[in-house]
Image: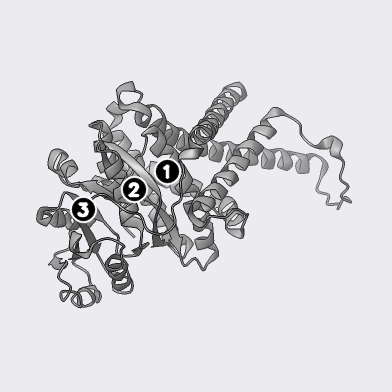
Amino acid sequence: MDAVSSVIFYVLTFLAVYVQIFFLITFLENRRKIVVRSGQTKLTQYPGVTIIVPCWNEEKTVEKTVHSLLDLDYPKDKVTIFLIDDGSTDGTWEAIKKFPQYPNIKIFQKENGGKYTALNLGLAHTETDFVGCLDADSFADKYSLVRIMSYFEKDPKVMAVAPSIIAHNSKSVIQHAQKAEYHMSVFMKKMFGFIGGIHVTPGPLTIFRKKVFTDLGPYRHAHNTEDMEIAYRMQKNHYKIDQCNDAFVYTNTPSTVKKLYRQRLRWIYGFINNTLDYKNLLFRKKYGYFSTFTLPAGLVSIVAVIYLIFRVAYDLAHFVYLKIIEIKTIGFSFELQPFTFDPFFISTESLGFVFIFIYSWIIISILLGKRMTEGKWGPYTGVFYFLFIFALIAPFWLLQAVYNTIIKRRPAWR
């Protein structure tokens, strides 16, 4: 049993190191291509863009979201904004009714059917060649749209471009941890963009050529992760997805552990089940790094975390069992021993250095993401909050996502 466990452990460790080295090499090969522009970006042409804002109980944030779109550095007559109230039960409808005086804004109200139905209503009324979405709790940077559109102008083969999403107005410790995570995500998404392996086109201002939906069909329910499924569908059909690292979109993040847990449970559940839906893509070279690296790396991460959970639980139970035997044999004694540090007892096994490398690269990824979004280096408390908090609670939403998949129970949206 111990031999089998050791083999599994070392295999998973090797794969984890392989993934980190792959990202490191990708970064070193493409680092000169990472450009953060300042000020205005000029295009040869400014094609029309429709931006759909699906709203469900977002009365507190939707006005700021809309004003961020109205302030975009893009010709006003080229931007159409659809505000869609998806059966809200608060004052969202009253909030968006303030905007019909703007000629480029149209408002819709429908019965609650889920975000994907609101997006599809917007798609049905879209007449421009480009279309995107902005979640009603997110806010676009002034130059975000024009920078995204520059990727389409540069490469006619690009069918969708995702922005860099940044945590907005972080106050609680949980939010500061997410701020570091979002910085790391900016870096990781850019690496995935370099290898053509992006697996999600996030709701906050990913822009598509409308041809994507004309050819492949509208959004689907997709386990409450419609922005992930459409990316899988695009990858299956060899539609290129890129990432614009200097197009910034700011999003509100969960402020409590409970809210964060529900959000991540939905995300991980969506990843597992969308991957199962598209399992025929796995390890098939014709789908590129998406099928040979992105999806396998995600699955290996889930398996590795679950294995470590059970390994730690087993080792802890075994330790307690031995202590019980010891107490029954020689009785209980409690003595405080003075602590003295002796470098002789520092472990120099290679495995220790492996974990140091992995965690060091995670920290470097966060700092690189910070550099790409804020233009400056330097550690901050969010890095340590992220490493500590996510190590404690992430295994539990991973376990529940797997369990929910087995019993076919869908997690709630919020």
Q: Which residue is mark 1?
A: 189
Q: Neighbour class for label 2 at 10 Å: few (<14), some, many (≥20)?
A: many
The CA distance from mark 1 to mark 3 is 23 Å
| 67 displayed left or right of 182 | left
Residue 284 % position (x, y) = 32, 22
Quadrant in which residue 295 is drawn: top left
Quadrant in which residue 94 is drawn: bottom left
Residue 273 % position (x, y) = 31, 40
Residue 332 % position (x, y) = 80, 48
Residue 94, placed above or below residue 39: below
Mark sitting earlier along the chain (3/2):
3
- Which residue appears at 76% of the width and 31% of the height? 348
**What colour scheme does the image use?**
one colour
Q: Nearer the viewer, mark 1 or mark 3?
A: 1
Mark sitting earlier along the chain (2/1):
2
Residue type at numbered disc 2 = Ala
Disc ID at residue 116: 3
Residue type at numbered disc 3 = Tyr
Q: Which residue is mark 2?
A: 162
The CA distance from mark 2 to mark 1 is 9 Å
